[in-house]
Amino acid sequence: MDAFDEGMVNCSNLSRVRKVIELRCSIGKTPERRNKGHKRPEYTVKQLKQDITRSTKEKEEFVRETRHKENRLLTLLIGLRALVQDETLQAILSKEGLGGGPKLSGSYEY
């Protein structure tokens, strides 16, 4: 309460102060008590290399998959363009009363 009256503790940091007080009451103030029995394992260079290798492989796989899908999409677009420009297909569609076929909008480069 003294800290609150002196302005060191206010509404914005009250929850943080409360957590610190609860921790100190339960495990104490000294670092030896806090870390006793709860030692965090060290992050080694070997683990770092493994993480970098794994992350790199995941990203390479993502790029490979994306390129494959892009190639499939471009192949489909090229095929559709060839069909739309085919005079025989246009004749069959108009004979069946289906007009000239669908109008494709947008542009693409291949």
Image (cartoon, rainbow, N blue to C red):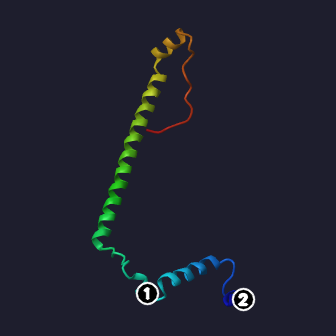
Q: Is residue 14 above or below residue 73?
A: below
Residue type, numbered disc 1: Pro
- Residue nearest the observer in this picture, 13 or 105: 13
Q: Position of residue 7 (x, y in %)?
A: 70, 87
* Residue depicted at 69% across the width and 81% down the height: 10
For the residues marked 2 and 1, what is the alpha-carbon distance in whole angstroms?
29 Å
Disc 1 packing (10 Å; few <14; some 14–19; many ≥20)? few
Q: Which residue is mark 2?
A: 5
Say which quadrant the C terminus sits in. top left
Residue type, numbered disc 2: Asp
Of the two numbered discs 2 and 1 on the same chain, state the one appearing first in sequence. Answer: 2
- Residue nearest the observer in this picture, 15 or 77: 15
* Residue depicted at 48% across the width and 86% down the height: 28
Kindly indicate whether the residue at mark 1 contacts the one at mark 2 (C-beta within 8 angstroms). Answer: no
Q: Position of residue 4 (x, y in %)?
A: 69, 86
Horizontal side of residue 27 vs 51, given as left or right: right
- Residue nearest the observer in this picture, 29 or 10: 29
Q: Position of residue 79 (x, y in %)?
A: 42, 28
Say which quadrant the N terminus sits in. bottom right
* Residue, far front: 26
Q: Is there any visible trace of residue 84 in the rendered image? A: yes
Mark 1: which secondary structure? helix
Residue 48 image-quadrant placement: bottom left
Q: Which residue is mark 1?
A: 31
Q: Is there any visible trace of residue 13 in the rendered image? A: no
